[in-house]
């Protein structure tokens, strides 16, 4: 499963996927400079496709260009991380309201069941983070709102980078699976309001967990 979804299979897209995997896995750290020469050499190409890849990742929110420094892995302040997670929570709350209004979609439930089965056997935090995002994306799609879906999709890359930090902690994947299983069960039983309350608590726990990890990292520095 690839953690980035571009529209074509061009060389610049392949380079962008490679850099994305390195960022989400933690191989590349926030603030680290991205060398056009290094990737051009790795892929046996000129610097032009690398520049295009970096441009794509800038749009996705994973890379930023700093004057006189070049392209760097995008770093987020603790406040920005919380803002991103809060926005995600609000979009999912709105999605649940739309589901309550229009009803639970069986096709989305089936997709969520399939994803949950994969989550049960996935131990790699990076891959699990992508599965987790795919599961939540089903909730967004179930809302039937194109506006909510488009706004949520814009958060995908930053969220994958941030949430991988949460799932790398011991016990977090197991807790996540339990809560996703219960959420799916509640939706299947059409208990949308109870499911919405569980989802809100689940998301608030994620925010709290990541805040604690940020504080712990800051204390070590």
Image (cartoon, helix red, strand yellow):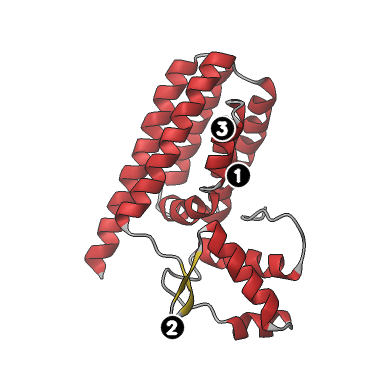
- Residue 213 visible in this rendered orientation of the protein: no
Lower sequence index among marks 2 and 1: 2
**Residue in the foreground of this view, choosing between 49 and 40:** 49
Q: Kindly identify which residue carries mark 1.
A: 121
- Residue 19 visible in this rendered orientation of the protein: yes
Q: Around disc 2, counting alpha carbons within 10 Å, would you say few (fewer than 14), some (14 to 19), or many (20 or more)?
A: few
Q: Kindly identify which residue carries mark 2.
A: 68
What label does residue 140 carry, if any?
Answer: 3
Query: Image quarter for residue 15?
Result: bottom right
What label does residue 92 carry, if any?
Answer: none
Image location (x, y in percent) of residue 174: 46, 41
* Label 2: element kind: loop
Position of residue 1 in the picture relative to residue 151 (left or right): right
- Residue drawn 66% across the image and 55% down it: 2
Lower sequence index among marks 3 and 1: 1
Q: Nearer the viewer, mark 3 or mark 2?
A: 2
- Residue drawn 53% across the image and 41% down it: 152
Image location (x, y in percent) of residue 216: 26, 59
């Amino acid at each position: 499963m690839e953690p980035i979804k571009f529209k074509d299979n061009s060389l610049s897209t392949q380079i962008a996927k490679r850099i994305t995997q390195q960022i989400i896995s933690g191989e590349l750290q926030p603030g680290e400079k991205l060398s056009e020469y290094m990737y051009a050499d790795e892929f046996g190409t000129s610097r032009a496709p690398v520049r295009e890849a970096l441009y794509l990742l800038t749009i996705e929110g994973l890379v930023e260009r700093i004057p006189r420094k070049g392209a760097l892995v995008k770093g987020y302040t603790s406040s920005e991380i919380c803002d991103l997670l809060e926005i995600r929570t609000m979009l999912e709350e709105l999605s649940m309201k739309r589901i309550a209004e229009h009803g639970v979609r069986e096709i989305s439930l089936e997709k969520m069941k399939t994803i949950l089965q994969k989550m049960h056997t996935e131990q790699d935090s990076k891959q699990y983070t992508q599965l987790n995002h795919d599961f939540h994306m089903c909730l967004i799609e179930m809302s039937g709102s194109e506006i909510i879906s488009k706004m949520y999709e814009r958060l995908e890359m930053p969220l994958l980078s941030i949430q991988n930090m949460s799932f790398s902690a011991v016990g977090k994947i197991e807790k996540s699976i339990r809560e996703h299983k219960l959420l799916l069960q509640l939706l299947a039983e059409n208990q949308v309001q109870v499911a919405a309350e569980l989802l809100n608590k689940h998301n608030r726990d994620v925010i709290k967990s990541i805040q604690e990890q940020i504080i712990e990292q800051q204390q070590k520095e």
